[in-house]
Amino acid sequence: MRRPGANVIAMTKTAYDGVAAWYDALVRAGSPADQVVIPPLFELLGNFQGQRICDLACGQGRIARAMARLGAEVVGVDISTQLLEIARRDEAAEPLGITYLSDDAETLATLPDDTFDGVVCHLALMDVADMAAAFRAIGRVLRSQGWFVFSITHPCFESPHATWTRAADGTVSRQVHNYFEEGFWRSENVEGVRGRVGAHHRTLSTCLNTLIQTGFTVERIVEPRATGPAADCVPGYAIVPAFMLVRCKKG
């Protein structure tokens, strides 16, 4: 059994440390993506009142706070010290009983085995270089039959340098490039998250097969389709799924 504090890794400056204030303001402002992804995320989470949950790659803690308000005991984990400072500041201003820890998603060295009923990771696995290591670490800290819910940009339609196009008649479509080329990439949009911090692209089969190989059973997959204001703002979100959500179970 690993003890809290054992093998604590020395944290280095991360990409998000350099953009923490900008990223926090972006998240707090909300976006069409939030309207598309967050409702199905909480639908997949289901009733978690009273459960002990790890918010993995929690950033400034908005999902952690939402779960705590709904009755969960939450531990937020992130490698960015600057984002954790923001999360802790919010916790001090509105105490919800959330503990925030500095740790690497690929090891979770500060967390003991068999500790959590569930782990949630919202739009952050693209920031993790070794996805298999992260899945193994998640499996280790989950209790028997524990659940894991994550959201990611859709690997099929948000592949490196994919673009939206609009025909003369107004029809919107998605052009996909380099789908089979896995690895780190950076968007040319310097005003967006992936332009500033980059992302690790994997194919759909790599994502799902890695889950299976690391001991998870996939229970449900959601590819949300935008409606209403989100679809009006980004019409492509109603054409192809820009995001994918997965609920799986340990063992």
Image (cartoon, rainbow, N blue to C red):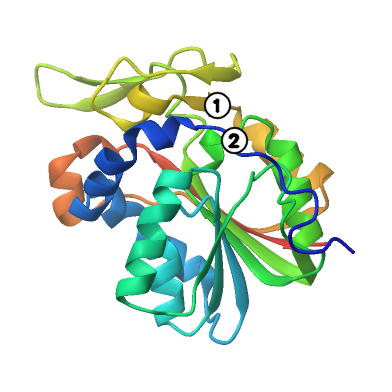
Amino acid beneath label 1: His
Q: Residue furthest right?
A: 1
Q: Looking at the picture, tell me which residue is in the foreground, 33 or 139.
A: 139
Task: Note whether residue 100 is visible.
Answer: yes
The alpha-carbon separation of the residues under discs 1 and 2 comes to: 7 Å
Amino acid beneath label 2: Val
Give the image quarter of residue 91.
bottom left
Label 2: few (<14), some or many (≥20) within 10 Å? some
- Of helix, strand and loop, which one carries label 1? strand
**Upstream in sequence: badge 1 or badge 2:** 2
Location of the N terminus by quadrant is bottom right
Q: Is residue 1 above or below residue 121?
A: below
- Of helix, strand and loop, which one carries label 2? loop
Residue at (23, 26) in percent of width and height: 191
Whether residues under marks 1 and 2 lie with C-beta atoms below 8 angstroms apart, the answer is yes
Residue 126, image x, y percentages: 52, 35
Give the image quarter of residue 200.
top right
Location of the C terminus by quadrant is bottom right
Residue at (54, 19) in percent of width and height: 184
Question: 165 left or right of 125?
Answer: left
Question: 135 left or right of 161?
Answer: right
Residue 93, image x, y percentages: 30, 73
Give the image quarter of residue 92.
bottom left
Q: Which residue is mark 1?
A: 200
Label 1: few (<14), some or many (≥20) within 10 Å? some
Residue 99, image x, y percentages: 54, 69
Residue 236, image x, y percentages: 26, 35
